Image (cartoon, rainbow, N blue to C red):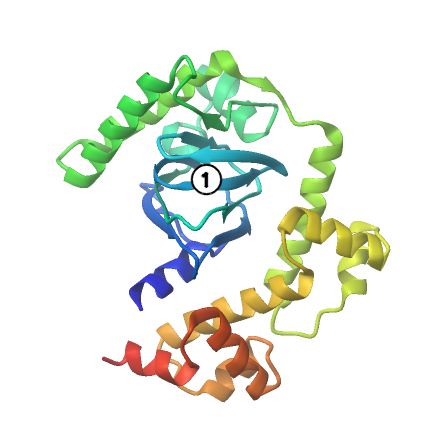
Amino acid sequence: MNKLRSLALEQKENAKHGEAFFPVQKYITKLNSDYPVVTTHWHEEAEFTLITKGSCLYQINLADYEVNAGDLLLIPPLFLHSVLLDSQEELMSETYVFHLNFLGGNSTDVCTTRYLLPMMNQEFSMPCLITPDHPVYDALKTMFVQITSYYNQAAFGYELALKSLFLQTVFLLLPYRTKTVAPDAKVSSEKLKAVLDYIELHYPDSISISELARLCFFSDYHFMRFFKKHMGMTCVEYLNNLRLEKSVELFEQGNSSILEVSLSVGFHNLSYFHRAFKKKYHVTPLAFIRELER
């Protein structure tokens, strides 16, 4: 049951990553046949990830990457990204989510104005996928191991070490930077963000395909194809998944009325909510609540 709860939390777009004065958080992601996807999301922080087991398909800013055990990923701030298990083998990864402000991104020195701000503003991007044949892979892998050691030990002064190592990560990848993403890809990314933001705000309400299509200036048909292409699921499937994840959060917060939770997340048919919940989580809402109360 803990696995179910942790996955639901990992998929939140608006999750709090660390504290305001120390915006760094470590995550362990585990995907399998029961939970094969981390849905498309984005946030203000960057991510530094090591795939420790298995293989998967990452989609980063609408580009696909085949990723295998041992690979490293650096996902810049504000980039849309998702993870899809593409085999029966279990996937495991370690990720450090950190805000560039921790590295000095909100200051006015030369490091910020010349490097960090352009990175935050997507004026250029570094390689997202770093495989073992990349020239700086060994150095980055060593730094990832050091980050893990300092983070886990949390000895006095470890924050200084982490800041230094994250800055070195950026430094090592700067020679391999590229121009910002193509205008068409950036427009598509912004349209998809607008739709996901709208759904996040209005998921308890009845949302029509037409109102989402209008956000993108698409016809209904064009929008449905656009959404399925970039999200890997239909809009209805995404909305139902989001509502189910929100219901899990409410149950975890102590709400025990299945009817109230169902209505508050946008399921107005209780029988349908029961079926959808059991299909996704392999337990009924009542069984899930009882497990939480143990």
Q: Position of residue 194 (x, y in %)?
A: 68, 51
Quarter location, residue 22: top left
Q: Which residue is mark 1?
A: 45
Q: Residue at x 50, y 28 (%)?
A: 128
Q: Residue at the right extreme?
A: 219
Q: Residues within 10 Å of mark 1 (few under 14, many from 20)?
A: many
Quarter location, residue 172: top left
Q: Amino acid at mark 1?
A: Glu
Q: Quadrant of the C terminus?
A: bottom left
Above or below — where is 118 with respect to 189?
Answer: above
Q: Is residue 213 left or right of residue 149?
A: right
Q: Is residue 221 left or right of residue 126?
A: right
Task: For mark 1, give the secondary structure.
Answer: loop
Q: Position of residue 104 (x, y in %)?
A: 40, 27
Q: Residue at the front extreme?
A: 88
Above or below — where is 159 with respect to 33?
Answer: above
Residue 154 in view here: no
Task: Pick whichever, 66 or 79, lies toward us.
Answer: 66
Q: Residue at x 49, y 11 (%)?
A: 175
Q: Position of residue 131 (x, y in %)?
A: 43, 24
- Report how many numbered discs are placed on residues in the image: 1
Residue 90 in view here: yes
Task: Pick whichever, 204 or 70, lies toward us.
Answer: 70
Q: Position of residue 88 (x, y in %)?
A: 43, 51
Q: Quadrant of the N terminus?
A: bottom left
